[in-house]
């Protein structure tokens, strides 16, 4: 049951407010397509589904409006806006620049242990790709980029990149379900790692930007942008 999951999450993280848990659940459902563009978000119905009162649902919906995922109309209620193709394209273009910055900063904080972990992630990704386990490949891709973000040693940059990564999860799942793209992505990841190993900030930045640019090209070549 969803409400049981929310309770368990709260038990693990007591400071993790109920409103935050409801917000993240709703955001996840919007980004994953459980709620479609134009769907109404009824506080009472959602509250009953999640086993919570209407108050945390109302506050969560307001927070979703601030993120641009929901529109609230007076006397009508809330409806899903979601992310358009333009929104996703904008995020990818911004992400390309920030990934480059992230890789450049990672060079400054690179230690052998973290570099070896990056290489291990890519090795595992290639192994699971060969087995056709693309869900695992996506999970490992998340680990690779999250570690890179941590290596940049900037909490502000980390939070921005983590949000971008989250917003793109559905389209990333599509791109990383292609054997050819996973292989090319692994090569691009290794180029980033090699630049970090060489302590070459400029090459690390260029390699990270190219990685995202190639992802954009793959999306366009395979017509993976959502329909408007």
Image (tube, grey):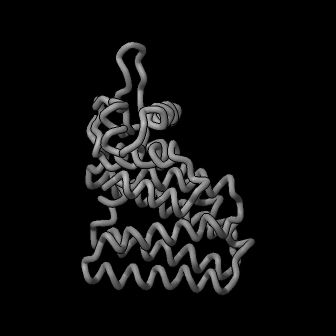
Residue 180, quarter of the rendered image: bottom left
Where 43 falls versus 178 (above or below)? Answer: above
- Give the total of numbered labels: 0
- Please state which of residues 56 and 60 is positioned toward the viewer in this rendering: 56
Q: Which residue corresponds to the image point at 57% horizontal and 77% vertical from the top-left?
A: 193
Query: Measured from the top left, where is residue 155 in percent x and y?
Result: 69, 57
Position of 102 with respect to 89 (left or right) is: right
Query: Measured from the top left, where is residue 110 in percent x and y?
Result: 69, 77
Residue positioned most to the right: 108
Where 92 falls versus 194 (above or below)? Answer: above
Where 184 falls versus 28 (above or below)? Answer: below
Q: Which residue corresponds to the image point at 30% horizontal and 34% vertical from the top-left?
A: 45
Query: Measured from the top left, where is residue 41 in percent x and y?
Result: 34, 31
Q: Is residue 141 something one can see in this rendering?
A: yes
Quadrant holding the C terminus: top left
Quadrant holding the N terminus: bottom left
- Please state which of residues 210 and 54 is positioned toward the viewer in this rendering: 54
């Amino acid at each position: 049951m969803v409400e049981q999951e929310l309770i368990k999450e709260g038990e693990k993280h007591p400071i993790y407010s109920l409103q935050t848990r409801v917000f993240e659940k709703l955001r996840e459902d919007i980004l994953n397509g459980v709620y479609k563009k134009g769907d109404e978000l009824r506080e009472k119905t959602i509250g009953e589904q999640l086993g919570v009162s209407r108050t945390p649902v109302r506050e969560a919906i307001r927070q979703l409006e601030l993120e641009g995922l929901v529109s609230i109309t007076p006397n009508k209620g809330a409806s899903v806006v979601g992310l358009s193709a333009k929104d996703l394209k904008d995020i990818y273009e911004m992400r390309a620049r920030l990934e480059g910055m992230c890789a450049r900063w990672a060079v400054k904080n690179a230690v052998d242990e973290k570099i070896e972990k990056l290489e291990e992630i890519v090795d595992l990704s290639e192994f699971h790709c060969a087995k056709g386990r693309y869900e695992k490949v996506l999970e490992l891709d998340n680990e690779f980029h999250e570690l890179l973000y941590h290596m940049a040693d900037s909490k502000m940059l980390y939070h921005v990149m983590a949000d971008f990564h989250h917003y793109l999860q559905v389209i990333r799942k599509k791109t990383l379900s292609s054997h050819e793209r996973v292989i090319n992505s692994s090569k691009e990841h290794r180029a980033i790692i090699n630049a970090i190993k060489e302590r070459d900030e400029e090459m690390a930045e260029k390699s990270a930007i190219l990685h995202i640019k190639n992802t954009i090209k793959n999306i366009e070549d395979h017509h993976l942008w959502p329909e408007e």
